[in-house]
Image (cartoon, grey):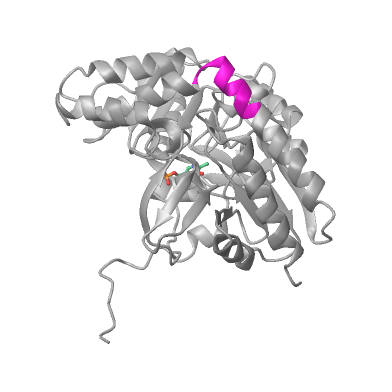
Amino acid sequence: MEKKTSHLFPTYARWSLHIEYGEGSYLYSKDGKKYLDFVSGIAVCNLGHRHHAVESAVSEQMQKYWHLSNLFPISLQEEVAEILTSHSDTDLAFFCNSGAEANEAAIKLARKYTKRHKIITFEKSFHGRTFATMSATGQAKIHDGYGPLLPEFVYLPLNDSDALEATMNTEVAAVMVEIVQGEGGVVVAQDEFLQKLAALCQQNGTLLIVDEVQTGIGRTGTAFAYQHVPHLSPDIITSAKGIANGLPLGVMLGKMNLAEAFGPGSHGSTFGGNPLSLAAAKASLEIIFNDAFLQTVSEKGCYLRDELKKHVYTIPFVKDIRGKGLMIGIACEVDVSSVIVELQQQGLLALTAGPNVIRLLPPLTISQQEMDEAVTIITDVLNNYCV
Ligand SMILES: Cc1ncc(COP(=O)(O)O)c(C=O)c1O
């Protein structure tokens, strides 16, 4: 038989799963198999696949117009900006198409507003693949082959207040931090560390940028993960992934004083704030940014972590079960790539976060029965894993 060649650049190591359709918490493959989806398109489909409210909102918008450009006032942008800013300590939104673009906007704004260059980020952080956001990312493997990087990024160890105190000064434009490092291994930034960071930012006139691309939009049980930390009030919040439940949308949120540096012509994107994505975002946020809904996310997260602790903590190579809300990492002493493959064979989709952590990102609408199903599969697979 003739070998089928792909016309795609091989930038992704793809799974050999051919999906036909998705519904709720499940994906169904072309060969008739059903998979419980604890990946959610990497924290994107927070309401599960093809949520009816999102589907109707997008269909309705499709009947009106698909794209106008930012030459026009777009009322959906105003409506979604109102929802996002009223659920965070911010006043203004800039819409784009991805997490990297949201962080790119934040880096540009921080430099322009402060007239400083230096930006502190953290080891094992992940902020995106554009030149600035790759340079902000504290992982050598992401930089490999692309140097020279954008200058003036400094990477510090997360949760190390002494290192931070020694590096902060009035030359630092911004500090960019994930409240829970996602790609870096589901590593939680400590409250005291974040409070120290905020205080140092304030003392030095440095902007605090919280990258909520993965943690935002209800994933951890609050609208944004920084809201778990008492008295934290970032200058800039970036988000993307879950915001439009599968349609591309990113956002940078910021405080009013920053507006002066981002006047007409200073930044932009043709597709940024696309009406179809915004219709999806409005429908998603109306469901997620609701106290009762967010409470269920926290409760489900506690339940899932407790069940995992009960069933897999006893396995000698399992070292930690951590995370916030429905962003959970099972840290192991072994390479978990073969565990992910075995979980798939047993009908559960999960992903890695670094070589040793199994990352679970179920839809926020996951049921207890589905969580129990996942725990049973994970327990069986880990118990049968041969070190
Ligand atoms: C914390 C964080 N920031 C930024 C990004 C980049 O987002 P995108 O892939 O949408 O550009 C990601 C993606 O995984 C992320 O997890």
Which of the 4 image quadrants contains residue 59? top left
Magenta span: predominant SS is helix
Q: Is residue 107 left or right of residue 154?
A: left
Vertical side of 149 occupied by 366: above or below: above
Comparing 357 with 283, the one in front is 283
Within the magenta stretch, is there residue 107? no
Pick whichever, 214 or 252, lies toward us. 214
Q: Nearer the viewer, residue 97 or 76?
A: 76
Which residues are drawn in magenta? 289-298
**Residue name at image x 29 percent, y 83 percent:** 3
Give the x, y percent position of residue 207: 54, 26
What residue is at 36 percent from the left and 61 percent from the top? 30
Q: Quadrant of the C terminus?
A: bottom right
- Looking at the rendered image, the quarter that the N terminus falls into is bottom left
Query: On the image, which quarter does residue 380 sit in?
Result: bottom right
Residue 163 visible (yes or no): no
- Is 290 inside the magenta-drawn segment? yes
- In the image, is 24 to the left or to the right of 168? left
Residue under the point 61% across and 37% down: 326
Residue 43 left/right relative to 324: left
Viewer can see residue 334: yes
The residue at the far bottom in this view is 1
Query: Is 47 placed above or below 317 here?
Result: above
- The location of residue 178, given as percent across then percent down, is 59, 37
